Amino acid sequence: MVDQQEFRDEELVALCQQGQGEYFDLLVRRYMEKAFHIAFDFTRNTETAKDLSQDAFLRAFSNIRQFDGRSSFYTWFYRIVVNLCLDHARRKGRVVWESLDSLGETPGEQPQLADTSFLPEQEAIAGEAKRRADKTLETMPKKQRTAFLLRNHQGLSIADIAKVMKTTEGTVRVYLHRAVAALRQSLVEFV
Amino acid sequence: MTSNVPFETACKRFEEDLVLYYYGETSETERHPIEQHLSGCQSCQRFVDDLRRLLPQMAKSEEFPQSFWEAYYDETVAKLAKQRERKYWWRDLLAPMRVWMLPAFGTVAIAVLAIGLVLGKGNLPSFTDRSPKNFPMETLSDAKQLEFFESMDMLESLSKLEEQDEQKAEPNQSSSARFVAANV
């Protein structure tokens, strides 16, 4: 078996683009946990997160020739995952989400109300505070939420989040600040 | 976990910077004034403490066993393999035929060509038959024009030859004129 440490992302992508698609399996191995966790953060459902993240890999593979290397593979791939998660949420009708491509980048957009009948299928990890935080996240404008999840849960830098969301670093900072302020406000009785 | 401690708000001017400070997203020059402010502002200190306590809790994700990841990987790789197969289905279609179909196709093609040539001999118009009646009218008129221009070329050549002859004749004429003048 090929040692996955042997190749950088760009090398693996280049091999896939040359028709050696089996090397994509190494990218799956490398990014499967991150992809799954992003999807899980958005959906709070193991099966849905698995389906969405696997779909992201399939889409990335079928579009690998369109990857031009201007961004890193992982920002390109994160974007696919995030867009799939947002599209999924929109289809489900929990929140009137729109994909990252569809709206302007105005940080001041108003929160869209979630369907309050929705509750995470899995129990929140840390009791009531966690559930409250999750609920706040669900009702948060999608871009604030995306910026927050990518920074707080995935550890992406603001520069990388800006690339994933195709916006400026300044805008991401605003999204992040607003998301944290909203979360902190919602957890006022728990702090 | 709940407490009756009043909710601390940070100084408005620093709130955004404190969030970025918590995430380590501030530059050296930005960090210095923030830390300086923090050292003297209890509200902002509590704000950062709250972030340190709350945000990592939120980031905690469910732990999945190794078997989950192995199954996930196998499933994803199987889906990818299926996608690759679908992408190159025509290769699979041709693959079993390749061994014997290529020479067979070649033989059939040559046979058809040979039969066509044998049966078609005499029926096809001959390329060597160049009698004018077989040419279309447009071609004939074009040919006439060509003949005209060829004759024009010849005329031009003739006139050039005449000019050359005249030029040759002129020196002889002048030398005879000089001879006559000398004798007079």
Image (spheres, coloured by chain):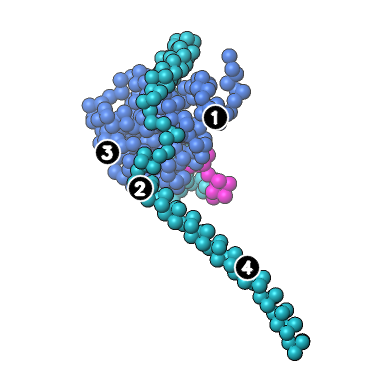
Chain colours: A blue, B cyan
Mark 3, residue position: A112
Q: Earlier in the sequence, mark 3 or mark 1?
A: 1
Q: Judge whether residue B23 is colored magenta.
A: yes
Secondary structure under tag 2 reads helix
Q: Nearer the viewer, residue B4 or A8?
A: A8
Q: Are tags 3 and 1 found on a single chain? A: yes
Q: Judge whether residue B50 is colored magenta.
A: no
**Residue B24 visible in the displayed image:** yes
Q: Position of residue A27 (x, y in %)?
A: 51, 24
- Where is A181 relative to A19, above or below? below
Mark 1, residue position: A14
Secondary structure under tag 1 reads helix
Q: Is mark 3 in CB contact (under 8 Å) with mark 2?
A: no
Res. A125 image quadrant: top left
Name the residue: 60% across, 64% down. B161
Prevailing secondary structure of the magenta residues: helix
Mark 2, residue position: B138
Q: Nearer the viewer, mark 3 or mark 1?
A: 1
Q: Chain of mark 1?
A: A
Q: Residues within 10 Å of mark 4 (few under 14, many from 20)?
A: few
Mark 4, residue position: B164
Q: What's the CA distance linking mark 3 and mark 1?
A: 41 Å
Res. A162 image quadrant: top left
